[in-house]
Amino acid sequence: MADPIPKKPAKISTEPPRGMRDILPDEAELRDTTAETILGVYRRYGFRRIETPALENIQLLTRGEGGENEKLIFKVLKRGEKLDLAQATSEADLVDLGLRFDLTVPLARYYANNQARLPRPLKAVQIGPVWRAERPQKGRFRQFTQCDIDILGIRSEVAEIELILATTEALTALGLEDLTVRINDRRLLTALAAWCGFDPDRYDSAFITLDKWDKLDPTAIVEELGRAGHAPVAIQRMVQMFTKFDKGEGLEGVRQYVKDPDGAQAIDGLKRIIEAVRSASGRPIVWDETLVRGMSYYTGPIFEITSARFPSSIAGGGRYDRLIGNLLGHDVPATGFSIGFERVVAILMDRTGGIERRAKRVALVFDEATADLKPVLEEARALRAQGYDVSLELRAKRSGAQAASLREQGFDVRWFGAAVPPAGDQA
Amino acid sequence: MADPIPKKPAKISTEPPRGMRDILPDEAELRDTTAETILGVYRRYGFRRIETPALENIQLLTRGEGGENEKLIFKVLKRGEKLDLAQATSEADLVDLGLRFDLTVPLARYYANNQARLPRPLKAVQIGPVWRAERPQKGRFRQFTQCDIDILGIRSEVAEIELILATTEALTALGLEDLTVRINDRRLLTALAAWCGFDPDRYDSAFITLDKWDKLDPTAIVEELGRAGHAPVAIQRMVQMFTKFDKGEGLEGVRQYVKDPDGAQAIDGLKRIIEAVRSASGRPIVWDETLVRGMSYYTGPIFEITSARFPSSIAGGGRYDRLIGNLLGHDVPATGFSIGFERVVAILMDRTGGIERRAKRVALVFDEATADLKPVLEEARALRAQGYDVSLELRAKRSGAQAASLREQGFDVRWFGAAVPPAGDQA
């Protein structure tokens, strides 16, 4: 305790770990207000906040539902007697926990574990960090914040309608404009792939190429599908079909290709969602027949929000009726929407530089020699009571530079008592 | 992608990892408002939010500054080629990262890494989870939230005065009453131990016993110090001295025992802090001559806040002028105060059950058969515009139970359109 800490040479790195970052005050405050705005809108839609631990048992995280993300888990070493390095022959012998890579797998566990004490249906909102050991690259970090809403226990499209209305409203409240909702349905994609005659075991490979329809021309699509070994007849049918859609086939036009009841339900559902969102919000929502979305657990409507002003989507989600059933033993209908929190923060930082003036900020500069602190503390108290953020500051020797730095942080600088302002400043 | 997920038997545990927990909506919302209240007060005092990653390089976390906490680190396995299990002979070969066990060690790294871009002095507020692999016990968890404020770059007691005023105000804003600030100084403890004649290398051992002055009687104190092998003369002097303090010796009375300038400065500083906090806030603040506090890095004033209504302290902190210097190569004066966030939440949960009505909550119950959703969506929109939290709910078959459950969550239940209310309910 009273042992003085020995002075160590400063040879240790002070950088954060590779791919992670320190957040400076301007951005931290912007992140706070962004989160508060989003949570405020979701609360107004009746969503309830929930929280799960950052760590989960490694068995839960490696069941296949996380897809490629499971390869990116930060795994935690066993502790104490459980760790037997001499006997360990593989990684599995060494680890028992992992950091969550998303908020959906933990949500499924949370629901399975707590369902008796949770509202039914559960409308949940989560916000928190997730971790993925991806190769670091510009704008991509190994710890990042996700913000998800999920509705568990509602089979009706009413759930999707609420998710979409709430999320577009949250993004609008943040000042993001020109938002378009794109929507499709996994059951419809499956019905169309069946009509084309793709091998049912290889639909996903065909969908991966279809997802690039916007970026590639039809010849390139044909080539890519061919290289993947799909049947030429199926390829030809798909390209003809989707070229037709480009010319404005519309949702009713697609019925002719849909032979199964699931596909027909998907069309009815999409129409219901599109109509309700349009009439309630007046916002653009379009059927995007090439929207696929990555995760394997989606089972119904899938959707994302894009803005003409930004290249990639700002939010995405979909229905996953079987994920919770895999833990619980019986299916629970579920659908969720995730805001790309880091993308939104990056857009807002670009716009504002993060300068956010919650309240008027005052820096009360006073002299350390002030024997009686009462007057300056009282002045600070009075200003705070008037709604100011007040920082007490000791007058620095270089008070001109001090004042400049305080103003850069958004403070109105006031010189108190015996603290003489630098030339050009008023007491 | 389109691969259906094979149904797996539900044989996996859905519990959170050992010692960690799921947070249900009522508590999650209470935690949100608690954090917002605390952050709101700290912002009004001019503190700026900062954030560091949850993971740090293992070298940073194991330099000795974390004391016992370093034994409790969750360590992260190396990834990819860096992990060479066959060649690994010790734990150190296997891990490169660890989860932070507090917010102070990361703050020191953050300051060293970003000082050129940070305000000077830096008044920082952090709130976030930390992890310690402690033996799980009632009320103690392996992931818990800390909330710290720190002032870096101010040597004057003005920093302590601000920390104390801001923190008592934050706790008062949460509705905690009967708060007392207890304060002492490590330099004064050292001066007193010197006067008694303890071995300078073993002051900390004496302090550990002194810390129990409130709980043990003088005979037990003498015995414990004797068992620890301290000199009988030193033990006798200490017990005599502190028995005198019990009778109200007061800060001026202690000067006679203080032979070095650091100890004298400590007395002057304590008097300045006590006087300023009393005159500015009117709150009780007392010199507690037996206050020690655990961390080895403290160098000056140490303090905590207790309430007569709760057994253990609610907040604690102190000055640590050398911790940052150990990373940076030159000392940076620093002092911090940490609110026991989990303790505060537990107190508030006991009082309120977590039921927190931010806004009036309305559940609009309507029938799934409703062909046109526009009217119900418009009603919800209108209510939200009036400041209500509105949840759309599909009428359940057992609508009486549904209504009861919604009311338990704090919703006012309204039956919309064709949704017939159950007996006893009004549309």
Image: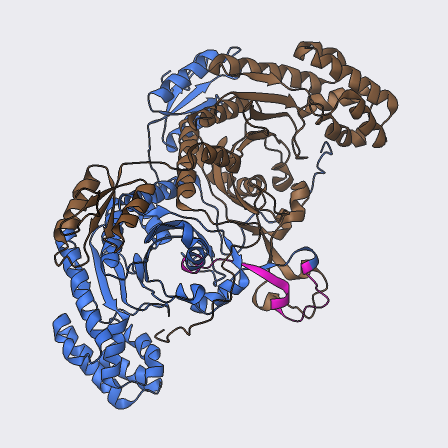
Chain colours: A brown, B blue
Please name the residue shown 37% across and 75% down the image. A4
User: Closest to the observer: B196 or B14?
Assistant: B196
User: Closest to the observer: A25 or B190?
Assistant: A25
Would you place residue A214 above or below residue A30 in this image?
Answer: above
**x then y, percent, for residue A247:** 70, 11
Q: Quadrant of residue A78?
A: bottom right
Can residue A409 be seen from the camera position used here?
no
Q: Quadrant of the C terminus of chain A?
A: top left
Would you place residue B121 above or below residue A385 in this image?
Answer: below
Outermost residue toward the front in this view: A423
Outermost residue toward the right in this view: A232
Please name the residue shown 36% across and 73% down the image. A1
Q: Quadrant of residue B353?
A: top left
Would you place residue A231 above or below residue B427 in this image?
Answer: below
User: Closest to the observer: B293 or B368?
Assistant: B293
Q: Is residue B219 magenta?
A: no
Would you place residue A53 above or below residue A336 in this image?
Answer: below
Outermost residue toward the bottom in this view: B232
**x then y, percent, for residue B418:** 46, 12
Q: Is residue B295 left or right of residue B418?
A: left
The number of numbered badges drawn on the structure is 0
**x then y, percent, for residue A11:** 51, 67
Q: Quadrant of residue B80?
A: bottom right
Q: Is residue B231 left or right of residue A307?
A: left
Q: Is residue B61 left or right of residue A380?
A: right
Q: Is residue A390 left or right of residue A105?
A: left
**x then y, percent, for residue B94:** 63, 64
Can residue B330 be seen from the camera position used here?
yes
Residue range of the region highlighted in magenta in the rendering? B82-106
Q: Is residue B86 magenta?
A: yes
